[in-house]
Image (cartoon, rainbow, N blue to C red):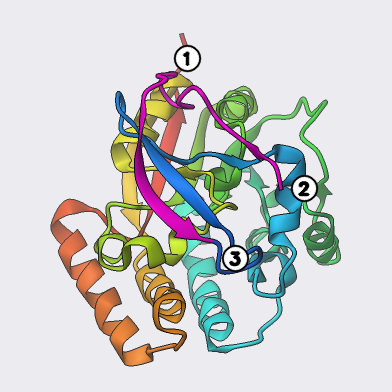
Amino acid sequence: MELENLTACPVCQSSSFTPYLQVKDYTVSKDTFKIVRCQQCQFLFTNPRPFAQNLGSYYKSDDYISHTNQSHNPVHLVYKLARTQTLKWKYNLIKKFNPATLLDYGCGTGHFLNYCASKGMQASGFEPDAPARTIAAAKGVPVLPSTQQVNKQWDVITLWHVLEHIPDVNRVMDWLYKHITTHGKLIVALPNPESYDARHFKQYWAAYDVPRHLSHFTKKTFTLLAERHHFSVEQILPMKLDSFYVSLLSNRYKTNGFKPIKSFITGLKSNSYANKTMNYSSLIYVLSPQHP
């Protein structure tokens, strides 16, 4: 399949890149993709990458559980158990901002959206993937198929491991700024390539997930992107369960086995080392819009 070659860094627009890592797509195509690093701002991104109109074909797999909600192996079961535990935690995180309205951008099959609605929140979702959107909408919560011609603003907008999938991050960040209330909060969860488990597994690190993950943000590069679009990073929080799930999946890629004990130890190490650096496997960024 023909690939798109970016000639400018999405964060700083520099045209100077260096090779960083070659990573295999273990989920769908089995092809190998390159991750490059911008020489100016250090942003990591998949390049070349599939054209936007072709990205959907890389999600067509029963292994892509956030779009299918099926369980075929122990990794899926761990994912679903972790999701159950984190729904309440995520809700409590946004509840402290006292939002009346919520948009879950990239809501997948709608579990978080439905949980917030069950707590009385006025919750909406956006999901471009039709099968996932059908599952989410069946839960009875409104799910937008497109963000075009949307004039509404929300008190909280969440993107749970979504931004790394988006081809045009600048366009989406502009849209988010326009559609959040003056004192609203933007909550963005992202994998962290500076974590211990990322450095340990290298090209086998499951959270690279090429070519579905187009951007690979560090704390520095995501902050640069946020500030460029008039957001300030108020807080960075850990997602500690992710290190265990990602380690389990990474060991599967590396050894063709699940290695649960070995994966658990790697997850513990990753969280332990991150206590001082905040370089957990996944991070949550709490952002506020900055108005002139």
Relative image position of residue 238 (x, y in whole percent): 33, 58
Numbered badge on residue 128? 2
First in residue order: circle 3 vs circle 2: 3
Residue identifier under label 1:
291
Q: Which portion, as a residue range, is magenta? A: 1-24
CA–CA distance between discs 3 and 1?
Answer: 45 Å
**How far apart, in angstroms, are the residues tagged by discs 3 and 2?**
24 Å
Q: Is residue 76 left or right of residue 244?
A: right
Viewer-nearest residue: 182 or 207? 207
Q: Residues within 10 Å of mark 2 (few under 14, many from 20)?
A: some
Label 3: which residue? 30
Return the residue nearer the eye: 119 or 18: 18
Discs 3, 2 touching: Cβ within 8 Å:
no
Residue lying at 41% horizontally and 73% vertically, measured from the top left: 250
Q: Position of residue 111 (x, y in %)?
A: 67, 66
**In this view, the mark in front (3 or 1):** 3
Q: Is residue 23 magenta?
A: yes
